[in-house]
Image (spheres, helix red, strand yellow):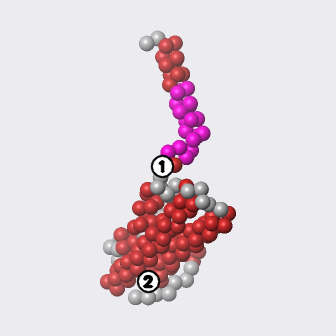
Amino acid sequence: MTPVRLAAVLMVGSLLTTLGALAQSQQPYGGLQSRPIKALSEEQIADLREGRGMGFALAAELNGYPGPLHVLEHAEALALTTSQRTRMEQLLKTMQTEAVELGRRLIAEEAELDRLFATRRVTAATMATAVGAAAQTQARLRATHLRYHLLTAEALSAEQIRRYAALRGYSGGAPAGGHQRQQHR
């Protein structure tokens, strides 16, 4: 292939790539209209049904308040005592039970909001009610995840929390903020 022909092929390829990217950016929601609940992806629905954190507890997690699931994942490295391990298992089970219930409620509330729009029965009042219900449930779900991070931190020593932060790659090991914890063992 001659240098001129090669340059032309590369230029056409570059142009097609640019046009494809431009077309995508002009249709950012293309394909989402077929979702059962437009505001929730399949992954989000699965996470809500399973009680997963979905980043709701990042304010706690990244400021030195570990969650029970990840503490259990690092149980050996953190040298958890038998009572601490039992406590983490209890916290995780209870948190997941609460989170699953709230997650399913949030899915139902988002489905109702979607249905109001899909059936063209939405009004300012019904929309405000549906949005308020979903927002309140999401706030309760987030508070649930955050509360269990508080309870987890109370059951760990300062050294365990420093080790946890290092294991998770958050810092050199020191929790931020110097918060006080009660020791429950």
Q: Which mark is residue 80?
A: none
Residue position marked by numbered label 2 in the rendering: 155
Residue 110 position in % (x across, y down): 53, 63
Is residue 162 covered in magenta? no
- Confirm whether residue 8 shows in the render: yes
Which residue in the protein does label 1 denote? 34
Q: Is residue 176 visible?
A: no
Residue 93 lies, in percent from the top left, at: 37, 77
Vertical placement of 11 versus 140: above or below? above
* Residue depicted at x 44% and y 77%: 98
The quarter of the picture where the C terminus appears is bottom left
Magenta span: chief secondary structure: helix
Q: Which of the two marks, 1 or 2, is nearer to us in this view?
A: 1
Which of the two discs, 1 and 2, labels the residue nearer the N terminus?
1
Left of 102 or right of it: where is 83?
left
**Callout 1: SS:** helix
Compute the Cα span from label 1 to label 2. Answer: 46 Å
Q: Amino acid at mark 1?
A: Ser
Helix, strand or loop status at disc 2: loop
Question: Residue 30 vs residue 85: left or right?
Answer: right
Give the residues in magenta: 14-31
